Amino acid sequence: MTSSSLSFHDALPQIGHGLPAASLVEELLGLPHRLRAVVESPPGTGKTTIIPPLLAARAEHREPGLKVVVTQPRRVAARAAARRLAQLTRTTVGDLIGYTVRGDAKVSAQTQIEFVTVGVLLRRLLRDPDLDDVSAVVIDEIHERSVETDLTAAFIRDLLPRRDDLELVAMSATAQSQQWVNYFDAALFTAHTDIYALTEEFSKPPTALDDRGVTPDFLAHVAKTTAQTSARTEGDVLVFLPGVAEIRAVQRQLPEALVLTGSSTAEEQDQVLSRANHQRIILATNVAESSLTVPGVRAVVDSGLERTQRLDTMRAMTGLVTVGASKASMRQRAGRAARLGPGLVVRCVTEREYAARPSDITPEILTSDLTSAVLFLACWGPTRLPTCPPQRAYRAAVEVLRALEAIEPPDEDSGAWPVVTDLGRRLASVPTEPRLARALLDGSELLDPVTAATAVALLDSDQRAPGVNVRARELPREAHRFLGLTGATPSGIAPAEKPREQDLVTVAALAYPDRIARRRERDSREFLLVSGTAAELPRDSRLPQTDWLVCTEVGLLRGKPIIRAAVPVDQDTVELLLPVTQERVAEWSGQKVNVREVSRIGAIILNQTPVAATSDDTLLATARAVRVQGLEALNPSQQFWQYWDRLRFAHHHLPDWPDPRSFTPEQWAPFAQDLLSGLKTLVGWDKDAELQTRVPERLTVPSGSSYRVDYSQNPPVLAVKLQEMFGAVETPTIVDVPVSIHLLSPAGRPLAITQDLPFFWSEVYPQVRAENRGRYAKHPWPEDPTTATATRLTNKRLHR
């Protein structure tokens, strides 16, 4: 069938034959108004196959010449969807149906349906915010909640009021669609499908994760479980594993198994996605969870693990971590086994572990690095995201972008929204992270465009393996694409097979200056990064022995930073690329000040020499110690804290009295050796004299004794033996605040607490007297304590 003769309206029955999602065609096709819809249907029901041509059919008469753009979360899914639809329409990929992904495109002027990755559409929206050549947008797999998908949803939502004619379909494989119905003010359409019986089994595994990642014992268990499942199943067995490394490990034990990942070649994809006349085992990442449908699957073996981004804002580290998958993801995986008939899922977790998993997929915006996202938001302008990002992660991204000169601090008129610079817009147009984009532009000037493009293409490769030297990987084929983005003409220029080591180091350092690291100790696997973070090399790292690295990828393993990929570098090169600062460091240590002259690059100290402390050093170090540790750093005396508490009491109960907490570290610094005298000086001698009178350190009781008042409590406490308060008919007060009298036994044990002595004598004392006069018979217990003589003495000594 030629492109000129194809009518999508007429081809819909052929395209949708046997697809459960085709049940929506008649209803959606007949809607008279522009379509704003959320389509909900399980994986494998044909949403991605039937909805785009349905929208193209609606546009054939309404908006001829415009195209339908369909987003996919992964490049492999975009290519596969385009090939599948081209097969069903008997056309050629790149003609009526095409795709555009990073570094690869097959489209033409005749293309009416274009499958794209989400990042491609995002950058297209920044160039053409109205999508003038588009009749409809399909956001597929919106339930996966990647950052780019959430951004796309927000930008398209902003576009809809400007484009009344633009049709939108958001497609979800989970039952969490109401959020999107509300978000887009859209109608919900559900494609039902026959659900066959699914047998669920749980296979108790050995420990899945340790400090090195997924354990070999666990992967051996997955391989064994897969072999056993294959032996008792007629159809194909689909095995879900968290990443490529784990797939390769299991494949070594199951050599006949096929592989399906986001980086699979077209030939590898076709081999997996085509029907076979024999049983197969397919080892897959979560790309097969909902993006791609593998035919013939009757059993699923689920490792229960997934790889996801996690941001550690305290260390400014982002990395892929292996975690337990949510129940929503594990249910989607299991559903792949019950599309053709009764199926089986074997989960490599215990039933108890499965029950404890989170119910829903966590939006990536809550856990990942937001540097690229904030740059897109700055370019786009104020918008309402489906989920608000964490403030700490947002602020961290803003700081990175400001350091890259991609955004400016917002002015008063712009509120809190970041303001993008011209350089920032240029960085956003480069399909890689902003750090590498800046390194591409700076490296082109410092070295040359070809060298910079080649190095960035290598550093940007998604084929990194843990512990592998960056230089050992093959150069990606995207160097020409990056070269074009520098402004150079790529035609006729052949990037080197691999960049020179020194050039790669230079570009890596331009991209990740805060990730230059030095080994902490000889033969240690731990490195200290310029940023101050400590990170370790994996035990199986094949990097050569070196003291310095540029860490191009730092991940997190059980919360600990792990160097996933790095370039060796020497100290001389580091000192050429990064500024070496000289500073005088004064530190308070054990009531004295130690001073060093330090040569450093960020947190990495190159040299340090002890020197004598000056008076300025002492003041500076003391103030810093107080600022960080509080006054406890100066080891205050008990008398100091007692005076402090009295001053705090005066501040709360008397007008115009200073709060000792208001004094700054710099004010405390000159008095490090005598804080009490310093506090009196800061308060002023007139206030000190008044304090002695109005907030006395001690109170004299009726017995004639004097006792210290505890002002650390509220109200102040006077602890005194009960017999010493005989004759007191009023409660003592300090600046009109009744003191809390802690009345003690002759042995010093608490008997009662009161702020109302008359009430205590009349109502409580008789009971106290009855309970204690036998126990303390040697001491006076008069019936009328208000007229008795106050004393510290026993009866015998009192009457002597």
Image (cartoon, rainbow, N blue to C red):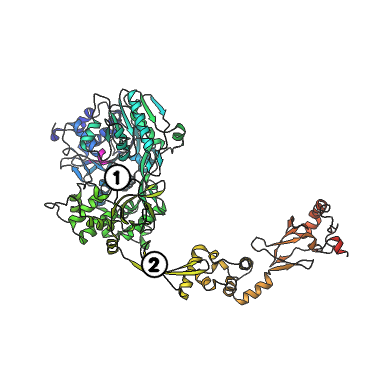
Q: Outermost residue toward the bottom?
A: 686
Extreme residue toward the front, this view? 523
Q: Secondary structure at mark 1?
A: loop
Q: Position of residue 92 (x, y in %)?
A: 15, 35
Residue 208 visible to an observer of this rendering: yes
As helix, strand or loop, the secondary structure at mark 2 comes to strand
Sequence-wise first label, 2 or 1? 1
Camera-nearest residue between 797 and 407? 797
Left or right of residue 325, residue 705 in this image: right
Residue 465 numbered tag = 1
Q: Quadrant of the C terminus?
A: bottom right
Among all residues in the image, which is located at the extreme right?
800
- Do labels 2 and 1 touch, CB within 8 Å? no
Name which residue type carries label 1: Ala
Q: Which residues are magenta?
A: 68-77
Tally the marks.
Answer: 2
Per the model, the C-alpha gap separating discs 2 and 1 is 37 Å
Q: Which amino acid, mark 2? A: Gln
Q: Which mark is residue 608?
A: 2
Q: Quadrant of residue 402?
A: bottom left
Q: Residue 363 falls in which quadrant of the image?
A: top left
